[in-house]
Image: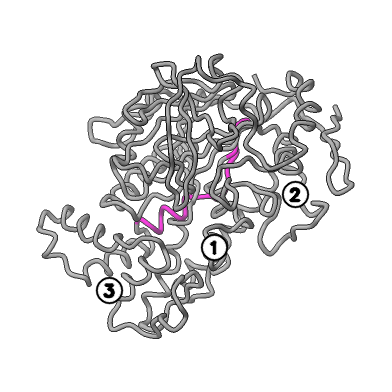
């Protein structure tokens, strides 16, 4: 069936919806992202999520026989349990290679640089140093000082070196002060070498993933990165270079990433080996984003406000492949995940809550039909599905003050959220009885959004996955 979804830049978008979509034999998908070195983040997720548990040995295990676990990247750095988390994820993936999926984030991929950086004491090769050029060191007195500088100045991980010292001490059963700087450097060298934790984790990962009608990527699928593989296709005004389907694009994007990793494995001290993948996960110098990367893109505008991708061409491209839900992390979004909606058409979930003070996670459980969110925010508990009738006209919508509805508490109050500068956030609770759906609209900067929605809604029941 052909459906006209409108036009852009004079190009008609006639989309063929394949009603026999990729079927999922999986009952549900447990989704977690951005633990960033915090075991509390992983542990609290498992406690809340009915799909997972810890077995008697303390290892991750499924509670249900057909479920899938997607870890969406950024396992390490901002907490004292980075290596413990890597070990847990690797062991789980080794036990269930098809049911445990790892999507790589920037804090994962950027470690590729360390094998070449720690082979010499000269200047760092990173392009993302934010200080004045004259303050950039041309050499370092030892490898520990270089690694500290790299973490702080180029990876947004100023405390990572000391967190690693703490974790090493715990593993050895000694005081932290007895762990030397050289011990920390050697730990990273060990885990980056073949069969080390970082090495194995990177080998297990992919850049983009599709399960049923859901797609997963660390950062964002936006207009300048969608359908494009670095070095193999060029972003064009009419999108003629895009791969025909999301599945073909994901396959080629992941193949490119594997080739980059293979280069690095063969010659890890060569700064050019895997350099394209390292560049792909970095922000554009002087900015906090890279809209040509699915790893470092963001669903936010210049002010940091969460916003949907453009309906045409991005959402249309995903719908054409039978995908109507996208799950990402990367961009801190307060103390609970943010939902963005083209109502009844397309949903984006941004689930990075790593800036939360207590580092606890929200449980996210996905099926083809609905998404369940369970957790706590601001002392209020919530446990709702995105299909909850109370949220119709509200969930994932934005009002004139810039607040987006994240969900609803057990006390029947809407959870409203707005991003502030510096990845900070403002949240408030408003009784459902005090708001009107007509005061909210999709969080998008597209002027043609409403016309597009009117055109697509009559066809929803024909292609929706059941």
Residue 396 x/y as whole percent: 57, 30
Q: Where is mark 1, residue-wise?
A: 287
Question: Which stretch is magenta?
Answer: 197-215
- Which corner quadrant of the image does residue 277 belong to? bottom right
Distance from Cα at disc 1 to Cα at disc 3: 28 Å
Q: Where is mark 2, residue-wise?
A: 243
Q: Secondary structure under badge 2?
A: loop
Nearest the eye: 147 or 287: 287
Identity of the residue drawn at 66% across and 53% down = 225
Between circles 1 and 3, the one closer to the viewer is 1
203 part of magenta stretch:
yes
Q: Quadrant of the N terminus?
A: top right
In the image, is 200 to the left or to the right of 256?
left
Can you say whether 400 is above or below 181 in the image?
A: above
Q: Earlier in the sequence, mark 2 or mark 1?
A: 2
Identity of the residue drawn at 31% across and 46% down = 38
In the image, is 169 to the left or to the right of 1?
left
Q: Where is mark 3, residue-wise?
A: 144
In the image, is 89 to the left or to the right of 231?
left
Q: Secondary structure under badge 3?
A: helix
Distance from Cα at disc 2 to Cα at disc 3: 44 Å
Q: Earlier in the sequence, mark 2 or mark 3?
A: 3
In the image, is 345 to the left or to the right of 267?
right
Q: Earlier in the sequence, mark 1 or mark 3?
A: 3
């Amino acid at each position: 069936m052909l459906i006209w979804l409108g036009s852009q830049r004079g190009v008609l978008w006639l989309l063929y919806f394949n009603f026999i979509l990729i079927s999922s034999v999986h009952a549900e998908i447990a989704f977690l992202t951005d633990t960033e070195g915090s075991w509390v983040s992983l542990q609290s997720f498992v406690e809340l999520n009915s799909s997972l548990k810890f077995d008697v040995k303390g290892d991750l295990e499924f509670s249900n026989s057909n479920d899938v676990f997607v870890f969406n990247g950024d396992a390490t750095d901002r907490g004292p349990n980075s290596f413990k988390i890597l070990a847990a994820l690797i062991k789980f993936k080794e036990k269930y290679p098809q049911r445990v999926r790892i999507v790589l984030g920037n804090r994962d991929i950027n470690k590729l640089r360390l094998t070449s950086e720690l082979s010499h004491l000269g200047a760092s090769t990173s392009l993302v140093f934010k200080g004045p050029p004259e303050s950039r060191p041309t050499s370092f007195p030892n490898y520990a000082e270089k690694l500290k500088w790299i973490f702080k100045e180029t990876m947004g991980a100023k405390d990572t070196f000391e967190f690693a010292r703490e974790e090493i001490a715990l593993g050895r059963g000694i005081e932290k002060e007895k762990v030397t700087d050289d011990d920390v450097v050697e730990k990273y060298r060990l885990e980056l070498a073949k069969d080390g934790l970082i090495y194995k984790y990177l080998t297990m990962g992919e850049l983009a993933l599709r399960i049923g009608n859901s797609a997963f990527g660390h950062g964002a699928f936006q207009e300048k990165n969608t359908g494009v593989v670095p070095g193999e296709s060029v972003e064009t005004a009419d999108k003629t270079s895009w791969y025909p389907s999301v599945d073909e694009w994901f396959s080629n994007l992941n193949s490119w990433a594997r080739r980059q990793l293979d280069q690095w494995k063969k010659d890890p001290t060569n700064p050019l080996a895997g350099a394209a993948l390292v560049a792909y996960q970095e922000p554009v110098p002087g900015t906090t984003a890279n809209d040509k990367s699915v790893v470092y893109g963001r669903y936010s505008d210049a002010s940091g406000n969460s916003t949907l991708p453009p309906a045409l061409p991005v959402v249309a491209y995903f719908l054409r492949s039978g995908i109507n839900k996208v799950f990402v992390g990367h961009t801190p979004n307060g103390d609970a995940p943010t939902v963005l909606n083209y109502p009844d058409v397309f949903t984006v979930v941004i689930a990075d809550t790593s800036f939360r003070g207590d580092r606890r996670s929200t449980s996210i459980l996905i099926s083809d039909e609905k998404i369940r969110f369970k957790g706590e925010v601001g002392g209020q508990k919530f446990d709702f599905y995105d299909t909850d009738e109370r949220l119709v006209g509200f969930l994932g919508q934005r009002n004139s003050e810039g607040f987006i509805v994240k969900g609803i508490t057990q006390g029947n109050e809407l959870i409203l959220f707005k991003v502030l500068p510096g990845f900070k956030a403002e949240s408030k609770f408003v009784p459902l009885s005090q708001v009107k759906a007509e005061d909210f609209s999709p969080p998008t900067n597209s002027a043609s959004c409403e016309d597009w929605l009117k055109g697509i809604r009559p066809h929803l029941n024909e292609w929706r996955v059941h």
